[in-house]
Structures are given as structure tokens and as C-alpha cells.
Image (spheres, grey):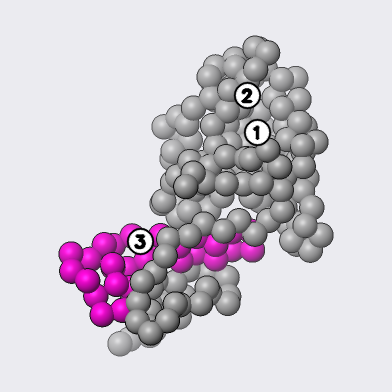
């Protein structure tokens, strides 16, 4: 094993899950791979979320323990006023698109909405400057609008989200009384639907 291989294993550990008991969640932030009975799972642990998913199923049972799929949101619920700030921003600028972000402060378990500075914008596209979270903050929800068009994830959205680790949110039909919305969890190539429950907590469908 050369130095590059050693560095890769330090950055992305591969662990065999003991058959005698469950594997404890990672104690540190980062990505690791777990060899379990049904194949290899990838576990990503961030301050605001932990997700474990089977990514390489085995054709035969392996002599290891079972690894359960899981999505655990560790950030608190998003306050209604933070969501309303984004909706108001999007309605204010329609038919043009807008871009913003919901940032979570792990020190205070608090949220804020931040508008992104736009480089160019129209009713069908936008380019923006990336935000710099303050100390203790994490960009959890990447939000943008589609003006008077319906909410959906475009090919450009798919390209922007490729490899990202965030929640993506798009708001559309802002000229109507009830706008439309789409939300998804993006975790380094794995994408699945997400939503906010009545209490503002992030969820994924069971």
C-alpha cells in the first residue's frame, strides 16, 4: 500500500460491521464505508445531518452485521419567519428568479435566511456569488425560485447539485395565490425527495 492509498483510507475509512452487534454511528464528521451483510454502505456525517445508504449491494450475504439505512437531521426546525422571508423575496422579484439560502447555526441552534448577490438574472436563469457562512453556521438549504414558472428541478439544477451535500429547494408559480415547491436532499451523488413537516422539521419520505 503506497502513501496515496493510505491517505485515501484515512479520508474514507472502510470498516467491517461486527456480526455480534450494531455499528455505532461515526464519532467524527466525514465519510466512511461500511461492509455489512447486504453489501457496502456509505455513511456521511455532517453537523446538520447523518445519512447511511447501501450503495453496493452484494449478490450473496456477507459474514458481517446488518447496516440499517438512515437519515437523521440534527438541525432544529426551520422557523416559519425564515421560510416567509424567502417566499416574500421570491414574490417581490418575480417574474425574475432569485437565489438565497437557509443557514443553520449549530452553536445556537438558530436559522437565518440570506439573499445571494446575483451576477446575472432573467425569468429563466440566474448566476450568483456563493455565500460565506459565519462562524458556526452551515448552509443547509440552497433555495431559488422559478418566477411564474412551475417548481421543478431543471437540467441545470441537476448539474449544480451533482456531488453537493445540501437540501435543494425551488419555488415556482409566484404570480399565483398558492406557489408550488420542490425539495430534495442531495448527498454526494445520492438524491432523494425531502419535505418540511408542520413543525418546520426536515424529513424524507419513509
> In the figure, 111 relative to 32: above or below?
above
x, y percentage for residue 5? Answer: 35, 80
Label 1 Cα neighbours within 10 Å, binned few <14 / some 14-19 / many ≥20: many
Residue 122 visible in the displayed image: no
> Which is more toward the observer, 89 or 44?
44
How far is disc 1 from disc 2 in space, using C-alphas? 7 Å
Q: Farthest residue toward the front?
A: 20
Give the mark, 3 or 1, whose residue is nearer the N terminus: 3
SS for callout 2: loop
Whether residue 18 appears in this view of the structure is yes
Mark positioned earlier in the residue sequence (2 or 3): 3
Q: Which residue is the site of mark 1?
A: 99
| Residue at the spot 44% in from the left edge and 38% down from the top edge | 158
In the picture, the disc for residue 54 is: 3
In reply to whether residue 50 is colored magenta, the answer given is yes
In the image: residue 195, left or right of residue 55: right
- The reply to whether dot 1 and dot 2 touch (C-beta < 8 Å) is yes
State the residue in front, 111 or 92: 111
Q: Position of residue 138 (x, y in %)?
A: 68, 55
Q: Residues within 10 Å of mark 3 (few under 14, many from 20)?
A: many
Q: Is residue 107 left or right of residue 39?
A: right
| Disc number lying in front (3 or 1) | 3
The residue lying at 53 percent from left, 24 percent from top is: 151
Q: Quick one: SS at disc 1?
A: strand
Q: Which residues are magenta?
A: 36-64
Amino acid at each position: 500500500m503506497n502513501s496515496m492509498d493510505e491517505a485515501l483510507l484515512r479520508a474514507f475509512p472502510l470498516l467491517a460491521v461486527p456480526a455480534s452487534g450494531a455499528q455505532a454511528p461515526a464519532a467524527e464528521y466525514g465519510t466512511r464505508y461500511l461492509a455489512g451483510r447486504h453489501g457496502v454502505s456509505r455513511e456521511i456525517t455532517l453537523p446538520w445531518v447523518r445519512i447511511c445508504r447501501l450503495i453496493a449491494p452484494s449478490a450473496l450475504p456477507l459474514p458481517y452485521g446488518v447496516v440499517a439505512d438512515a437519515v437523521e437531521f440534527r438541525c432544529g426546525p426551520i422557523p416559519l419567519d425564515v421560510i416567509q422571508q424567502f417566499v416574500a423575496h421570491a414574490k417581490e422579484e418575480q417574474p425574475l428568479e432569485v437565489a438565497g439560502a437557509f443557514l443553520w447555526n449549530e452553536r445556537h441552534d438558530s436559522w437565518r435566511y440570506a439573499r445571494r448577490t446575483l451576477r446575472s438574472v432573467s425569468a429563466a436563469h440566474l448566476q450568483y456569488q456563493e455565500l460565506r457562512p459565519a462562524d458556526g453556521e452551515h448552509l443547509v438549504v440552497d433555495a431559488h425560485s422559478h418566477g411564474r414558472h412551475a417548481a421543478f428541478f431543471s437540467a441545470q439544477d441537476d448539474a449544480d447539485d451533482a456531488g453537493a451535500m445540501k437540501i435543494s429547494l425551488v419555488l415556482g408559480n409566484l404570480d399565483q395565490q398558492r406557489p408550488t415547491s420542490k425539495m430534495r436532499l442531495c448527498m454526494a451523488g445520492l438524491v432523494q425527495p425531502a419535505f418540511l413537516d408542520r413543525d418546520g422539521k426536515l424529513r424524507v419520505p419513509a
